[in-house]
Image (spheres, helix red, strand yellow):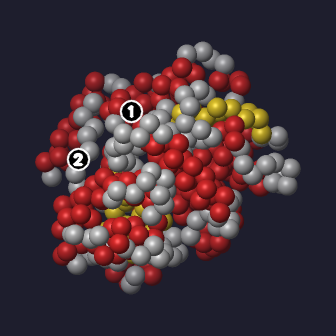
């Protein structure tokens, strides 16, 4: 993936394969195993098994993961909804205080890496909200779910083994960032998972499409599904910010201006909130930052490093179809349109989580589990330390 290599901290980011390690842990049956699946993966994996781009394989994918031996199959979309609750509240708090605006989204590690390396002067603009992958790992290992597994999981003597399946090579690096507490043990790309499925002779295309996610970390809304497309995070955030401001009846649910895989910066004026922007790819963000206009024009800016967003990620299947991004994107928005709930705050398990454990968005409990920090790392010393850490991990 050109974009992921571009934003790699030491130029060494490659798709380090982990699927043999994952199979070894699953086969040993020594640990309770959990897998979470990103929104873009359930569409693109179909192409690995000869289906047309845009084919949705959520149920087949869940059944394949169970056949591989995972004890629990959860949905990263659950924490995409949680991300929106935290990030939308963070945006409104910054608007109220008039500080650190515009807010930059931070769920793309390629973009976070780029800022840390190239523009550490802009770190304060990044949302402190963790990405859905890292939130899911935190809630799986350190939330009510782990405690429900038994006393040894409550007192820290045991923890579930957590794997995520992502469209993204940069997510492997994100899982090892300082401050992420090892909440995700291994990250597999969509392509790696396809190799794993083939290695076990599982006939993916013949699997039933009836698989469903486990709960309570499996429920999601349409707003979470559109995270997989460029503009999706911003549209999802607008839906919830409108609700938090009591404006949902006056603000449309769909924001076509923020959708699409074209190169230009997409913008929309949100009544009661302000103008928001979406940069489709790092190059679009770099062009936007060439002048200082963004500082006063926008209240929030989404940047996804890959063109098209995660559905064009470096871990997705390679395709010769020139319209592949449009077809994957259409599938994502069709899923949102069909979803019974389309706003993150309508996720009943997310609401329960706030009632039982997190109290409210941006509370101290939420900050402890769901937020992080960033630091500039363009110095020669920090580059060297990161490279040595990378070599260590390759050798481990
Ligand atoms: Fe990864 Fe998505 Fe960012 Fe690409 S856009 S680097 S796939 S998180």
The residue located at (64%, 64%) in the rendering is 339
Residue 90, position in %: x, y?
65, 47
SS at mark 1 in the image: helix
Which quadrant holds residue 266? top right
Q: Is mark 1 within 8 Å of ligand 1?
A: yes
Looking at the image, which is closer to me, 348 or 97?
348
Direction from residue 30 to residue 262 in the image, left or right:
right
The Cα atoms of the two marked residues, 2 and 1, are separated by 16 Å
The residue located at (65%, 63%) in the rendering is 338
Looking at the image, which is closer to me, 385 or 73?
73
* First in residue order: circle 2 vs circle 1: 1
Q: Residue furthest top?
A: 291
Residue 179, position in %: x, y?
40, 50
Q: Residue furthest left?
A: 395
Q: Can residue 354 be spotted in the picture?
A: no
Give the position of the N terminus as an image quadrant.
Answer: top left
Residue 341, position in %: x, y?
68, 65
Look at mark 2 in the image and give the residue it sits on. Answer: 16
Direction from residue 382 to residue 146 in the image, left or right:
right
Direction from residue 73 to residue 261 in the image, left or right:
right
- Local packing at callout 1 (Cα closer than 10 Å; few below 14, some 14-19, many 20+) is some
The residue located at (48%, 60%) in the rendering is 56
Look at mark 1 in the image and give the residue it sits on. Answer: 3
- Local packing at callout 2 (Cα closer than 10 Å; few below 14, some 14-19, many 20+) is few
The residue located at (34%, 63%) in the rendering is 163
């Amino acid at each position: 993936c050109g974009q992921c290599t571009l934003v790699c901290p030491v130029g060494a980011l490659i798709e380090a394969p982990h699927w043999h390690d994952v199979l070894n842990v699953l086969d040993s049956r020594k640990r309770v195993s959990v897998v979470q699946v990103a929104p873009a993966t359930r569409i693109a994996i179909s192409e690995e098994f000869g289906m047309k781009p845009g084919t949705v394989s959520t149920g087949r994918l869940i059944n394949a993961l169970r056949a591989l031996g995972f004890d629990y199959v959860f949905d990263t979309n659950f924490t995409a909804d949680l991300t929106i609750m935290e990030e939308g509240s963070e945006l409104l708090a910054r608007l109220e205080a008039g500080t650190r605006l515009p807010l930059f989204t931070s769920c793309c590690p390629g973009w976070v890496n780029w800022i840390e390396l190239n523009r550490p002067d802009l770190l304060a603009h990044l949302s402190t909200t963790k990405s859905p992958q890292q939130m899911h790992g935190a809630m799986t290992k350190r939330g009510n779910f782990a405690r429900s597994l038994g006393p040894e999981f409550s007192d820290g003597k045991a923890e579930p083994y957590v794997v995520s399946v992502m469209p993204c090579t940069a997510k492997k690096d994100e899982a090892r960032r300082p401050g992420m507490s090892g909440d995700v043990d291994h990250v597999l790309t969509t392509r790696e998972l396809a190799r794993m499925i083939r290695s076990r002779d599982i006939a993916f295309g013949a699997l039933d499409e009836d698989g469903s996610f486990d709960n309570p970390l499996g429920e999601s809304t349409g707003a979470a599904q559109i995270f997989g497309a460029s503009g999706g995070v911003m549209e999802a955030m607008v839906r919830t910010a409108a609700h938090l401001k009591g404006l949902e009846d006056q603000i449309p649910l769909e924001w076509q201006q923020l959708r699409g895989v074209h190169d230009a910066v997409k913008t929309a004026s949100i009544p009661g909130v302000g103008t928001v922007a979406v940069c489709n790819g790092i190059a679009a963000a770099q062009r936007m930052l060439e002048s200082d206009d963004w500082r006063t024009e926008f209240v929030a800016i989404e940047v996804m490093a890959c063109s098209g967003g995660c559905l064009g990620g470096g871990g997705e299947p390679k395709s010769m179809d020139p319209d592949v991004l449009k077809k994957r994107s259409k599938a994502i928005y069709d899923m949102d349109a069909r979803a019974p709930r389309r706003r993150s705050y309508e996720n009943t398990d997310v609401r329960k989580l706030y009632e039982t454990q997190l109290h409210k968005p941006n509370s101290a409990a939420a900050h402890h589990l769901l937020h992080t920090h960033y630091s500039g790392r363009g110095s020669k010393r920090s580059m060297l330390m990161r490279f040595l850490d990378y070599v260590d991990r390759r050798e481990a």
